[in-house]
Amino acid sequence: MPLGDRGGDKSEARFCGVETEFSDDIPEVITFNLSTGKFDFVVAPLTDPSYRPSLVPKNSFGSAAPPFAGSDLVLSPSQWSSHVVGKISSWIDLDSEDETVRIDSETTLRQELAWASHLSLQACLLPAPKGSTCANYARCVNQILQDLSNMQLWLRIPLVLHDDDVTSTDSNSATLVDSWETWNSFRLLCEHHSQLSVALDILSTLPSANSLGRWFGESVRAAIVNTDSFLTNGRGYPCLSKRHQMLITRFFNYNIQIIISGNSGHAKASVGVVDSRSGADSQRHPLRPYLEYVGHLYQKLDPLPEQERFELGYRDYLQSPLQPLMDNLEARTYETFEKDAMKYIQYQRAVSKAMLDMIPDNEASVKTLVLMVVGAGRGPLVRASLQASEETGRKLKVYAVEKNPNAVVTLHALVRLEGWEDTVTIVSCDMRYWNAPEKADILVSELLGSFGDNELSPECLDGAQRFLKPGGISIPSSYTSFIQPVTASKLYNDVKAHKDISHFETAYVVKIHNAARLAPCQSVFTFTHPKPADDRESNERYKKLHFTLPNDTGSAMVHGFAGYFDATLYKDVHLGIEPLTATPNMFSWFSIFFPLRTPICVKPGSKLEVDFWRCCGPKKVWYEWCVTSPSPSPIHNSNGRSYWPLLITVRSRKRLNLR
Amino acid sequence: MPLGDRGGDKSEARFCGVETEFSDDIPEVITFNLSTGKFDFVVAPLTDPSYRPSLVPKNSFGSAAPPFAGSDLVLSPSQWSSHVVGKISSWIDLDSEDETVRIDSETTLRQELAWASHLSLQACLLPAPKGSTCANYARCVNQILQDLSNMQLWLRIPLVLHDDDVTSTDSNSATLVDSWETWNSFRLLCEHHSQLSVALDILSTLPSANSLGRWFGESVRAAIVNTDSFLTNGRGYPCLSKRHQMLITRFFNYNIQIIISGNSGHAKASVGVVDSRSGADSQRHPLRPYLEYVGHLYQKLDPLPEQERFELGYRDYLQSPLQPLMDNLEARTYETFEKDAMKYIQYQRAVSKAMLDMIPDNEASVKTLVLMVVGAGRGPLVRASLQASEETGRKLKVYAVEKNPNAVVTLHALVRLEGWEDTVTIVSCDMRYWNAPEKADILVSELLGSFGDNELSPECLDGAQRFLKPGGISIPSSYTSFIQPVTASKLYNDVKAHKDISHFETAYVVKIHNAARLAPCQSVFTFTHPKPADDRESNERYKKLHFTLPNDTGSAMVHGFAGYFDATLYKDVHLGIEPLTATPNMFSWFSIFFPLRTPICVKPGSKLEVDFWRCCGPKKVWYEWCVTSPSPSPIHNSNGRSYWPLLITVRSRKRLNLR
């Protein structure tokens, strides 16, 4: 029975499981935990825990099957698959120095996973690696992963980081216990295999927030909450600490399933008191109060805001610059973007401030400003400008320059409809080739990409600048791109699935969700308009950035960089998606993701040094990027061999009439 | 004029160059240095060193060419190509914080390399990176490398390692200056590009031997020896210290060209005294005494031993396990291997000792031992066994088991020719299916691969063991494989050129030459025959190895592992290729090379931990390997997906009748 029903949310996190002991009567296990206990699934051992292959007499070899918990006859494959996560024997230790234990462990792991595959289980829980090394465990799991059909393997990892040593710069310190390192070794040995993920064991003490944050960029599927981690509330019921509650809530938002584990240790949980909240049968399953508490946390979640509901389908979905999707959605695309009210409010504010600065009160009735909207589309910036004129009482003459002839048709209709014929002149022309009849006081444009300049706004505005009066104003007056390092194993795996280098040398537009932002953003490239007189001719840029991860993070994996922009429209009026200063309720831009071909592990105390270039050739503009510290990566996208921004959207292609 | 003529050696190292100053009369530069000076080529600047693009007046842009040293009209392209290595302006600094310097440097680098390409130069010398970072320099060079036809780029790197800090475990120490790190960053940023190599600047002090050793695994093309590094001998002539002499000699052996650089600073070099050694015209070129000294070192080289001459063509040539070459060379292959006298001498010694142990003197005339040669081929081990019998006066009855029917024909002819009919029985049969008429006292085989067990000797001998008497002897009685980490950029690049993962998950037979052996060998897998009664059934193995690089090495790149074997034939008689204990004058085996998909940089003080597995499935046997520290690599060759030893040679395929 799902934990609750949150509007629009179809997350797996609605389902809650329970870890059980071995029983050879698996139908009874299901009945007790699902019907009586109201859990959604069980995490149940597949084999009798006392079984050891080496203790089976040699002569019975090949005849006797291992003591499995139940066959596909007592429970149908579809029941197995929907109700049971297989729990691999927890005694196994594939890196034991005792060779008998090691070989017994290998045999058992293979037998159980083969059996789980036979039963079509959706997932199996692998016990946590026991020692400081896990190479042989990873080798066997990796071998099995090569041929596994759909089953997920959840590696159990206790959520442990001993904080006492994280400020030390000596990363070889033997006393620093960070279970993330175990996970990291294991998944590197298994090459980020997409069917290998994590089940976190939540203990009563939690590591620091920065350290916890790393896990939200990893492939975590489940969180196992031990009953020992629960406190007892005033009424004798189990509850969780504030920090634990926040963590569970965050798990819900990241689609991570909760599994209750352990014995009932709370008065009101273990004694069979009839509970008015949950009905009479709650007394029968000792862990039901824990489930109800988790359900309570789920039901307390705020409903998803409309914008997030809209974006849900785009979460972590890489938009490839080569997909021609937008070609056919042109009119709808205009319509979607025009709905972004916040964006046009900011433009209107900027135009208002600029007009007030250019025309003092006493000249308001006599002076008319020339304003040109370059890239007018279906007219939203024209409307914003005219509203600014009305709001300020300053007079305006508007040129709306647009090269898409279809949009120009709509513009003409709009002007007639609104009665703007005396104020607005429509110019059906490429801004670069337009022979303007007069010069503008104000140039308004919105040519920004997720990374600011990546849709070639600098190149377009350089062309338009020739019809701006000296002292004239460009809105936006400048824009800056930002990046920050992220752990984002899902994005990395999606890029890797293409099995070529060029996809790793491409920047993607994506609503980044399943990611850990490891350090605050830093600015990359800035462009100012109109271009200052002393500026270099070139729009090439080079920036070297140094990131430092917070000391209590522990080691972390950098899969790439999340990119954003912030634009100054005019003076204090800005527009942007840089997380700390993002304009609220704006949905026109997702962030951008620059992947790394080989993820880079950053240890505590070591610096992350990154170089970004914006390169301009005679026919194209592109980015190159690399990491130089802690260890040098290859330079990505040399000569723009894999990706150049001109291809990023059809919009920019249309603008510059290329390809 | 080449430095000398060493029998069989066609190495580039015979040619010696000289670094010159800028001159706009390049024909005169060539005449003076090549005709008068007897150098083989010049390393000459291509552009006037005072040229700066930013100082060229804007209005002359596009009309005036940069001040190049000479055009393709004063010297033909073939003269340019054979006599000149282009020296890129040494003032350039592409990572300067001064943007004008940086952009001037980028422009100059591009102009000069484009010009050098136009002249079809074979190589250009790039100046050493100036600061602690080289990202932008590497980015520009990498861009140029993407489109470069055949020209080599030699990055100048001073041979510097300040020893004072190498014992510190703090690898972030700012006072540790190791120029190898600069090279390593540069080539990682440029992805090990095969046209990017090193020109080492040899200074008057040299780093430690271990530190120097790293360079012999790197792509070093030239060594620039400054005249300041020379001493003056008793007669006033330039000479080099003992360590410098050894280094130059090693350069010769690694095909590295010497370039003399600097001013003449020695009495007998600068004054125009007629020198009896070199003729009257030596007085005209001030650096000629230095050239003569280098020539003297070259002529002092020992002539190449015959075995090395034979192996010259195989140096660093990866033998792919998939190449069917040996299929057609079967008879010749037998012939080649039979010439390896040392191998058969060792077998004869082993058989002799075993016979003496099995038959005391007083039984010599009455007892006859049964000896079986399994895999007899064309009979060399039969011969060795019979010679042992003669040498010891012990009697022998020999079975020669061979499954190649062509070799059996030769065996019959041999037996007739030698009159062995009474002693030797030829069995044309697969040893695994042979129904032996009696059991053997001694089982002789040679089924060893470069890595010992990699041609499936264990599996073959398990099959043959059933016809060995209890207490019988197997020759060999055991064998062990060994590995050591190596820097081997050439091998790495050759594997990388295939552009797929499976070539990185393959072990290659190769005469490893251009490599740095970073730590002593360690043993991996051991097999003993006959198999001890208490042995596990399986021939699977797992070994974890810890390597420590010598403290004074500095950081080093591990491109993979060189593998060897050593076999105990009987008691103290062994046979093997492990470098420290290798049997001399034996050429039957080259070493084996296990590559790493991503080379791993090992810093001073950090340990290198490596795991190797030998895995056995129902139909195949294969290795898997990985690095777990300093950072985990993927597990290579999971499930034998890319490579399994059965394919390594036709020999093993034939033996087991597979595929």
Image: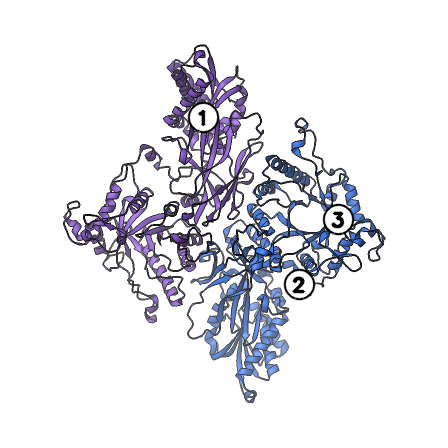
Chain colours: A purple, B blue
Q: Is residue B366 visible?
A: yes
Q: Amino acid at mark 2?
A: Glu
Residue A101 sits above or below residue B190 on the image: below
Check if mark 1 and mark 2 are on a common chain: no
- Which percent across, then down, holds residue A377? 43, 23
Q: What kind of element bears circle 1?
A: strand
Host chain of mark 2? B
Label whose residue precedes the other's in the sequence (2 or 3): 3
Q: Report, in whole angstroms, how far the alpha carbon at label 1 lies from the one at label 2.
A: 74 Å
Along the line of sight, the residue nearer the viewer: B316 or A463: A463
Please give the residue where the numbered disc 2 appears in the rendered image: B308
Task: Identify the mark at residue B263; answer none if there is no mark.
Answer: 3
Residue A580 sits above or below residue B376 on the image: above
Please give the residue where the numbered disc 1 appears in the rendered image: A569
Residue at point 39%, 67% (across, down):
A98
Q: Amino acid at mark 3?
A: Asn
Task: Identify the mark at residue A75; answer none if there is no mark.
Answer: none
Host chain of mark 3? B
Q: Report, in whole angstroms, how far the alpha carbon at label 1 lies from the one at label 3.
A: 62 Å
Q: Report, in whole angstroms, how far the alpha carbon at label 2 lies from the one at label 3.
A: 38 Å
- Which percent across, then down, holds residue B539? 45, 67
Q: What kind of element bears circle 3?
A: loop
Q: What kind of element bears circle 2?
A: helix
